[in-house]
Image (cartoon, rainbow, N blue to C red):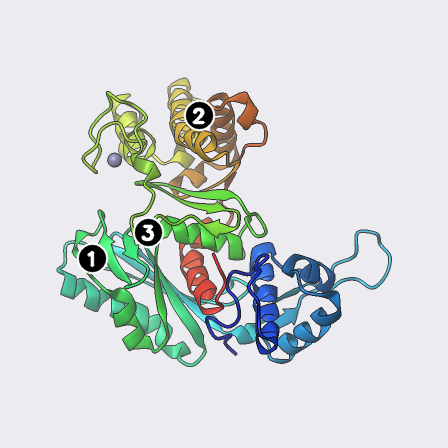
Amino acid sequence: MIVPAGSGTRRGRGSSRLLRTADVGAANRARVLQALADHGPLSRADLARLADVPRATIGSIVANLLASGVLEETAPRRQASGAGKPARPLWFGADVGLTGGVLVRPGTIETAVVSTSGEIVSRGASPFAVSASRADLDRQLVSAAAAVLRPYRGRLVGTGVAMPASCDGETGEVVACTPVPGLVGTRLPALLRRATGVPVVLEEDARALAVGQRWFGQARGVDDFVAVQIGAGIGAGIMLDGRLYRAGPATSEIGHTCVDIRGERCRCGLTGCWETIASLRWLRREAVARRLRAGRTLTPGGLVERAGDPAVADLLDTYADHVAVGIANLVQLLSLRVFILHGEVVGGGEPLRLLIERAVVRRTLPVLAGAVRVEFAALDQDAGLLGAAAAALTKELAIVA
Ligand SMILES: [Zn+2]
């Protein structure tokens, strides 16, 4: 059962719009779904409060949503007081439908079918030639994604596609894509929709990570945080007051903010970008320059493993500091405190996380530094795919994100 997009008011929180009586039910229902997406699984009492729906009517709204399979009761949770019947938090039911998630990275396309609880039901991955023409890329990507999604025809609510590209949310067109320039101008959503029969939404990969973290990850119920992708390049999805910060089709390009005015030229054409001193490319180049063993293939995980060697430990400290400088800039700019890191950096585990967090605190004004938390994404391997699926789920349930 799919909740039709646009049902009721989408500006859930504290809307003062006058509603006709016939609309009130739909509006309350939309608020209930929005509150769950914002806060994660909730008891009826918490749901009534957070959705701003009268206690007297929450029972019948929830009963209808349970009867239609949109919501389900999850395993009982004991009340904090220890008294009374244990609460059974409500969450989206399996009958909402499955969602497709497609993650395009330079040279690889991954596709998954994802449940409302974030379980991957089916998946596939195929290589593609980055240098192919646009027509060729369209053909290869659509056929690879459709091969995984087609068997679920009729059970899919929608599909989300995440890629390292600026995308026009209205037309679904790729506006800019540095890693795969051949994709500029492509309208993958329309092509994939034709092949699979369900709506398709396109989202920049770092933004999709933020949406995925909120639906399925450690940011469930967290209103303000940044998902930061740190690997070959750097990108960020910023969640402010529970809404994804969107700067139109052009993404906010934190990886290309200047951290060294006399720095080296970046692949974007500017100089001294954060990416030039904190990406995996920098780490490997630096390891080679410092004559470290196997520097060309070094990973953050390898760096931590070999940190007994003082030369490696020194590079580890510098890398952590370089990652931290951009995060500290985000703290000072937006006063945000929670940063969930994704990408190769996560391979460095707790030792690297701690070094980065300490360096962020050191580089931040004391008035802001107190509550800074740098976390590594627990979903890491599948975060991109889940984020793509979450973008589609958000759209099809008419959730505001
Ligand atoms: Zn740059």
**Label 3 – label 1 distance at C-alpha:** 19 Å
Residue 248: mark in rendering? 3
Of the two numbered discs 3 and 1 on the same chain, state the one appearing first in sequence: 1
Of the two numbered discs 3 and 2 on the same chain, state the one appearing first in sequence: 3
Image coordinates of residue 22 in percent, x first then y, are: 59, 78
Q: Give the residue type at disc 3.
A: Gly
Residue pictured at 29% horizontal, 76% vertical: 195
Image coordinates of residue 350 in percent, x first then y, are: 52, 35
Residue pictured at 55% horizontal, 76% vertical: 95
Q: Quadrant of ligand 1?
A: top left
Q: Please, is residue 302 above or below residue 167 in the view?
A: above
Residue 183: mark in rendering? 1
**Which picture quadrant has residue 384?**
bottom left
Query: Is residue 179 or residue 397 the one in the foreground?
Result: 397
**Which picture quadrant has residue 282?**
top left
Residue annotated with mark 2: 307
Q: Give the residue type at disc 2.
A: Ala
**Label 1 – label 2 distance at C-alpha:** 41 Å
Q: How busy is the neighbourhood of tag 2: few (under 14 within 10 Å), some, or many (20 plus)?
A: some
